[in-house]
Image (cartoon, rainbow, N blue to C red):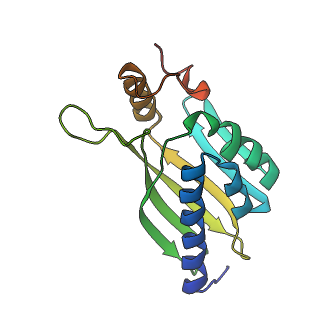
Amino acid sequence: MPNFSRDEMEEMMRRWTAANQKSEREGNWRQLADCFSEDCVYGWETPNGKYEFIGRESIRETCVGAAMDPYKGWTYPYDKIVIDESRGEAFATWWQTPPGAPSREDGSPMKVIGASWFKYGGNYQWCEQMDMYDYGAITNLIKECFDKGIIKELPLMSTDQVTK
């Protein structure tokens, strides 16, 4: 069983969240792939099945590439982070937030919570990541943003779940 130091795991998460913030600012998520090992496994599930990609360059093309391209201007600020250095794992929650962080008429923020589980592989790289979220809530948020004119197009990966 891996046994990484707390300091190393905290530094990895600091690097990850900094890279995430940079990606938000620049609208380029592909650079996040540099935080993964060459043989990393990254996945998530939707009502249509499980998506899993293996390898840094595959992840760069898909998970942090084509899958994120439609979400330019969206932010994913991390909220809670739990680190288990004895297992080399981290779990974090984040908020999927539309461009401009809009609020609803009742004043509540337009955002949906999600979570990620990470397996650390050493050398400041993740060797596994699994994202978890309420797909229905996200598609409803996307439709709400489209209906209010916050976004002008429905993201490609959501058009089969969200109708105009």
Q: How many marks?
A: 0
Q: Is residue 136 left or right of residue 68?
A: left
| Residue drawn at point x = 81 percent, y = 50 percent | 57
| Residue drawn at point x = 70 percent, y = 49 percent | 30
Q: Is residue 101 left or right of residue 13?
A: left
Q: Is residue 78 above or below residue 3?
A: above
Q: Is residue 52 left or right of residue 12?
A: right
**Depth check, front residue: 112 or 15:** 15
Q: Is residue 8 left or right of residue 162?
A: right
Q: Residue furthest top?
A: 164
| Residue drawn at point x = 60 percent, y = 53 percent | 23
**Depth check, front residue: 155 or 8:** 155
**Percent position of residue 152, x then y:** 49, 22
Q: Residue 159, located in which quarter of the rendered image?
A: top right
**Depth check, front residue: 6 or 164:** 164
**Percent position of residue 146, x then y:** 43, 23
Q: Is residue 70 above or below residue 93?
A: above
**Percent position of residue 95, x then y:** 42, 49
Identify the image quadrant of the N terminus.
Answer: bottom right
Q: Residue 128, located in which quarter of the rendered image?
A: bottom right
**Percent position of residue 43, x then y:** 65, 47
